[in-house]
């Protein structure tokens, strides 16, 4: 099945169900979902996550429950 774009709100809903949090790769502008156990990632709030997606022109894609953040 192909990756389909989903809204940020839908991605947040899926992330919360899977116990995922928004994260930033330390020292970069890269964002991803995290369980909060990776020392290379810092947890950020959902507002900062959304702002980063917009400013970097990123889109969240989903397929069979898997989510990936890529350029639009």
Image: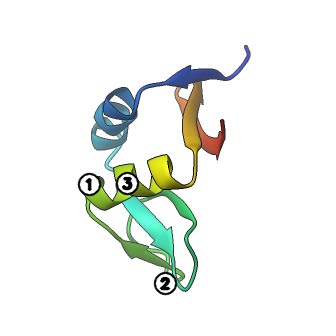
- Binning the other alpha carbons within 10 Å of mark 3 as few (below 14), some (14 to 19) or many (20 upward) gives few
Please state the horizontal and vertical placement of residue 66, each as a whole percent of the image: 57, 33
Residue carrying label 1: 47
Front position in the image: 64 or 32: 32
Front position in the image: 40 or 51: 51
Q: How many marks?
A: 3
Q: CA distance from mark 3 to mark 1?
A: 6 Å
- Pick whichever of labels 1 and 2 is earlier in the sequence: 2
- The reply to whether the C-beta atoms of the residues labelled 3 and 1 are less than 8 Å apart is yes
Q: Residue at x 32, y 61 (%)?
A: 48
Is residue 23 depicted above or below 9 in this figure?
below
Q: Is residue 64 visible?
A: no
**Quarter location, residue 34:** bottom left
Please state, as top left, top right, bottom left or bottom right, where the C terminus lies in the image: top right
Q: CA distance from mark 1 to mark 2?
A: 22 Å
Front position in the image: 58 or 21: 58
Residue carrying label 2: 39
Element marked by disc 3: helix
Please state the horizontal and vertical placement of residue 49, each as a whole percent of the image: 37, 56
Rendered image: mark on residue 51: 3
Q: CA distance from mark 2 to mark 3?
A: 23 Å
- Binning the other alpha carbons within 10 Å of mark 1 as few (below 14), some (14 to 19) or many (20 upward) gives few
Q: Residue at x 56, y 37 (%)?
A: 59
Q: Residue at x 57, y 54 (%)?
A: 56
Q: Is residue 1 visible?
A: yes
- Pick whichever of labels 2 and 3 is earlier in the sequence: 2
Element marked by disc 2: loop
Element marked by disc 1: helix
Q: Is residue 62 left or right of residue 51?
A: right
> Which residue is the extreme one toward the right?
2
Q: Is residue 19 left or right of residue 3?
A: left
Q: Is residue 31 left or right of residue 36?
A: right
């Amino acid at each position: 099945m192909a990756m389909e774009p989903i809204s940020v709100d839908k991605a947040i809903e899926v992330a919360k169900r899977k116990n995922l949090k928004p994260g930033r790769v330390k020292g970069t502008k890269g964002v991803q979902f995290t369980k909060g156990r990776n020392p290379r990632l810092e947890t950020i709030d959902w507002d900062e996550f959304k702002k980063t997606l917009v400013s970097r022109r990123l889109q969240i894609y989903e397929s069979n429950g898997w989510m990936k953040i890529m350029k639009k």
